[in-house]
Amino acid sequence: MQLQDTPAEADFRRRLREWLGKTLPELPPPPDPSDWPGRRAFDTQWQRRLFDAGYAGIHWPVDAGGRGASPSEHLIFLEETEHAGAPYVGASFVGLLHAGPTIAAEGSPDQRARFLPPILRGDEIWCQGFSEPGAGSDLAALRTKAVRDGDSYVVSGSKIWTSHAEVADWCELLVRTDPDAPKHKGITWLAMNMDAPGVTVRPLRTLAGTTEFAELFLDEVRIPVANRVGEENDGWRVTMVTLSFERGTAFASEAVACRREVRELARVARAEGAWDDLELRRALAALSAEFAALWRLVQWNVSEASADGVPGAGGSVFKLRFSEARQRLYDLAARVVGADALVEGAWTAQRLQGLSYTIAAGTSQIQRNIVAQRILGLPKGR
Amino acid sequence: MHFQLTEDQRALQAGLREVLTRHEPDWAELAEVGLFTLRVPEERDGIGLGLPEAVLAFEEAGRALVRGPLVGTELAATLGRGTAEFVAVPARGPLLVPHLPELSCLLLRERDGSVTVVPAGAIHARPARAVDPQRPLWELTGPPPEGERCTDAEAARLTAEGTLLTAALQCGLAARALAEAVRHAGRREQFGQPIGAFQAVQHLCADMLARAELARVAVYAAAVSADAEEIAGAKLLADEAAVHNARDCLQVHGGMGFTWEAPVHLLLKRAWAWEQAVADRDSCLDALAGHL
């Protein structure tokens, strides 16, 4: 049981830190959050720099064009980039963390050659077409239908909560190819070109006033059968292969960010006089302990996954505690800044954005079901 | 970085769990399995292991709800002393010493952080009515007698390690409370099915697991880093896990949980006791705030 870097990891960390120190000052200023084309350009430029320096697809296998880094090195990458204030993965998220690894694991040689290099270089952006208005937590209830017609699937239906849809080139799309099969069995994974005729994107405005995601309307969109990853009706398994891996590290850099935010909030509290409030000071102290422990939990889960190759349900425990702790952090920030919490500003924006954390990527209630049934083995209700 | 138990650590954990859960061990057996000499160097007839191994052992002792002056005796062994309790002078209320007649000395922590080793025989005290029937208490009737003052460095080490070992006991207790709740929820039937099938009960249990897991990892990490700030945070989370899990375990047991016949109340009462032991919630929070 140890928390030290191995010599190879320490060397990796040192080189990465040097590169970040040299590269970050050269970056242009970050774009306005409402400027989607600007955000895409910024995110893809950052991805290109990572690619040129050999840091693209850090956790991808070498034969897929990645660096083949160990899970520990991946964590070091997330930790160091966050510490240095590097840009987030942003619009490259789905490509790098989900669609790309799925194609690397399950795609044909042609599909790997066609899709993987542009993701790593930052040339192509992906979005995720999984959820539907009638299939949120119950994802397998999705109804968007695909009917085979010669060399194409003809797809009709709608998708929702699609982040980066406005600037994406491709969509990883789950469709129902067999309406008569049990609901997990009749699903297929397709790569859909976002420029295909019949695709309509309608941005959704969040309660924070921003358009973080969109609704997709698909009206007889033709998708070549060659764009199917995995077998027909086997899409659920294809999806689960990579979804569990995504959960292991998806929030790791944010856990690092939260430790920084607690210290920043303590600084604000001292400046605003709120630090003299014993109750508030202790609430901040309790949060600092929780975020420190959550970072240790990430390290524990990643070590466990690298030992047996499969991420455990520990990701659900992390997601549950992290999302709730982070919401408490922003509620506490509102107490620290006082009346300013009712005016738009950085902490208020975080507080609004934070309301999604206990909903997105599996609600807290679904996470509790997973923990109770899969880890504790409690029976399913009738 | 490989933040997982080693093979040797797993073997230690499994061996102790076997010994401690087979039957309730007496004090001689605890000494026999090396619970107090894990960190004593081999040349002084100890086992020569480190803080992480001591933490694993104390986690098992907490899971088995072992009674007696565990933490103080382990700390005293590193000083070459016998059976001991580590007692911190509380912010409010009387100075209470558990297991007084069995002690050879008391490690007494003053509010200023200093620690003195006080001979137990010199203490004047009367029995108090302890809420935890397995942790009898004595209340001091006068000021504590003069003792041998530890160096500041030694006092800091004893406080940090005592805090961590108490946190480890709480982790074991939290895991035990979860296991008892899950066992009961899987057996007890209402409305024609086990109550564990009801989402309301499942969510109670899921939160118990989340608390126990986060605390356990925090305690392990603090054992590896031996960092005072990390130890304070680990105690905080371990106390929360133990107290809340024992409380939720009682809730899952329903009316039976409120009786003396079900052993659940013993978990909660011990969690309350260990919550106040060595470093309580407020002192941990103030220590953490000092680092922010």
Image (cartoon, coloured by chain):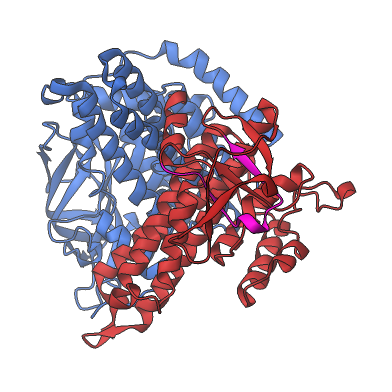
Chain colours: A blue, B red
Q: Which residue reaches farthest bottom?
A: B192
- The residue located at (25%, 32%) in the rendering is A332
Residue A68 visible in the picture? no
B12 with respect to A336 (left or right) = right
B238 with respect to B45 (left or right) = left
A263 with respect to B33 (left or right) = left
- Quarter of the figure with the C terminus of chain A: bottom left
Towards the viewer: B21 or B75: B75
B215 in relation to B249, above or below: above
- The residue located at (68%, 37%) in the rendering is A6
- The residue located at (54%, 64%) in the rendering is B63
B15 in relation to B167, above or below: below
Q: Is residue B138 magenta?
A: no
Q: Give the magenta range.
A: B93-109
Q: Is residue B104 magenta?
A: yes
Q: Which residue reaches farthest right?
A: B43
Corner quadrant of residue A166? top left
Corner quadrant of residue B252? bottom left
Q: Position of residue B259 (x, y in %)?
A: 35, 76
Q: Position of residue B234 (x, y in %)?
A: 50, 43
Towards the viewer: B91 or A26: B91
- The residue located at (11%, 31%) in the rendering is A209
A341 with respect to B286 (left or right) = left
Q: Position of residue B205 (x, y in %)?
A: 35, 65
Q: Position of residue B238 (x, y in %)?
A: 47, 50
Towards the viewer: B21 or A160: B21
**Total label count?**
0
Towards the viewer: A170 or A114: A170
A339 in relation to B226, above or below: above
Corner quadrant of residue B106? top right
Residue B136 visible in the picture? yes
